Amino acid sequence: MRNKMRSGNANVRNSSRPSVGSHGELDGGDIPNVPSSELRAVHKIHLARLHHNYIEVEAAANRQRCSVIVVVKADGYGHGAIRTALFLADNMGADAFAVATLEEGIALRKAFQDTPPGMPYNPSGGNSLQAKNSNSTKDVASLFQPSTNTTNPTRSIDPSFSRRRYHRPAKVRILVLGPPAPAKNVFDDFLHFNIEVMISGPEVAKALLEWVCNTEERKRLQVERAATEAKERALQLQSNVQQTQQGTNHSSRLRKKTSDPDSPNNENSVNFNMETSQLYRPPSATLGNVTGMDLAKEVRQILNNQKMTSASTTNSSDTTILTNSSLNASPKGKTAIKTFPGIEEAAKNSRSRHKAISKATRCEPDTTDAHPKNPLSKSSLGIGRKRLRWHALVDSGMGRLGFRTDTVSSEEEGQRRDTVDIMKELLELEDNMDVPVEFFGMCTHMADASSSSYTGSQMERFKFLLKRARAAGISVPTISTDNSAALLTTEHKHFDPKELLTQDFTDSRGFVRTGGAIYGQRPAFHQIRAISTLCASVRHVAILKQGESVGYDRAYIAPSDVRIATIAIGFADGYPRELGNGVGKVAIRGSLFPVAGNVCMDMLMVDLGPAQSSDSPGASIVVGDTAILWGPESDEDGDGLVRLQDLAAQLNTTQSALTCGLNKDRVLRQYE
């Protein structure tokens, strides 16, 4: 990899330059046939290391009977949310992802819908260089051959990975960790795109309650949205058929030498018309116009027909798919883990149990199973329809968002409501009004995972509220508590699966939300590997005479004749300006060189050493070389000569602050 950026084909014209997608990623995730003069700054993401880290995190989660929610907020901590999520889902079977905003969740949901398993993500809609040249596509399995590094066996890659291809689950969960925006119809978007919402306090709970009770407005928006999508699908189908017809007619004219291709007696035209008449039926006049009551009636009838058709299909099939996927992904030779019957089944049991308790309290007969064999009964119809899943975020000590864990004191009566009472109110609406919402779990966030005492106190507060909720008849389908550091700190004994996950009827399913460890940004844990490499090209090499200066403010004055290299990256690209004047180091050809002078907006300079020395490491540096700003140069390179964790420590910041700070429009991404 040392000189990959120099190995481009100099005869390739500028038109071959890969296009940059909306997320700053190279379409296709590769840089084929690009001359070095066109490369500037590149952020490399090592997929083999991403795979390794996920395996480590998953193993730690399994030890406490939990599954993994991969946090891909902030564009995957600067590594590309969509590309990393697709990779982990397709190759590792990851089925749950967390983002910070609804917009991030919608973009991720659309990417999963538009990208078939095993296919590269194409944000440009089919105009990428990889779509035009299939030879540039790398075999994903070839990236994960067993490592030859025998000095550190814990850093080897699982050799069975090449046989575990395309394991995307049938259903992929997406959870928004941040509070929803105070927009009027924000919950409609959560429901429509099947994205789980975090209810982060009484204010958000009140907004959800108002949305639930506004039945007419909610149904009207659902019908209008369904109508709009039906129209878009019809128009897209019509466009596809027209393109097919043009291609077929063109082929017919090439094959037919004597007959008139437009003649109605032409055999090819007759066959095409018969095929297209079966493939395509023009949309009705109603679908061509998205306004009016006729449209609403038609779409409502379509939705009812779809509901009747799918009523006989329950979530048991989905449960089987998820169970089989989990069993297949388990490494051989390991102790079998008790398989969770399915999140949907747990949520359904929670609703049924709470509904039965509610009816018993009101002394009403329980009619839940009045018609258990009728596939079109109201209860079975409710199972298959779309529901807005919501989680209760608990503030156990983080102090920024969430419900309080303590009970309401006598002094606070009338000023705030008890958390359990708020949860019960939402659940009663779900049970009694049969509204499209579904309580899906409780979660909290660790504030200081390095402190076992404070983490333990947070867990005690969380368990106190959890026990009160269960005592009030609230069954909790899922629980998530740990972050990366809390999960990997093995001496912590704060998570007791028996105490947290065990409840009457169906046990809760445990989850850990982890992002930093998966991206290699938890240096305290040696099993985690760095996956990020920032590099840029050397664009200029010159001799600086003694007393001459370089850069703004003349911050660097040459103490003697020195060789200076100019690197094509600056603070506008995301390289911190604070690393100038010798604070930062750059690796070129296996040697370290200090940053000379202030970091410029688009460039920085490094001191290569004395100009007179011909045998110094800097004497061999030439234009076109690759400069490593941070990260490993190869898979056997550890964390690299310039470690991201060291730069973060120098700046008194976090590694994620540096990777998130990279400019996605100026720094291209490459997945290796």
Image (tube, helix red, strand yellow):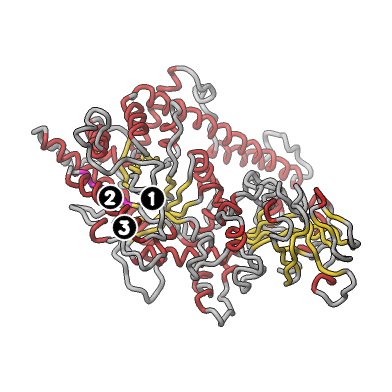
- Taking the image as shown, residue 613 lies to the left or right of residue 226, namely right
Image location (x, y in percent) of residue 286? 49, 22
Residue 445: numbered disc: 1
**Residue segment shown in magenta:** 474-479
**Could you say whether the residue bearing mark 1 is in a helix, strand or loop?**
loop
How far apart marks 2 and 1 lie (CA) works out to 12 Å
The residue under label 2 is which amino acid type? Answer: Arg
Q: Which residue is drawn at 48% across and 39% down?
A: 102
Residue 461: numbered disc: 2
Mostly what secondary structure, the magenta segment? loop
**Which-is-in-front pick, marks 2 and 1?**
2
Asked whether residue 131 is in view, the answer is no
Q: In this view, does 478 lie above or below 330?
A: above
The residue under label 1 is which amino acid type? Answer: His
**Could you say whether the residue bearing mark 2 is in a helix, strand or loop?**
helix
Per the image, is 478 magenta? yes
Question: In terms of depth relative to the viewer, which is nearer, 443 or 619?
Answer: 619
Check disc 2: other Cα within 10 Å, few if <14, some if 14-19, many if 20+.
some
Image location (x, y in percent) of residue 75? 56, 48
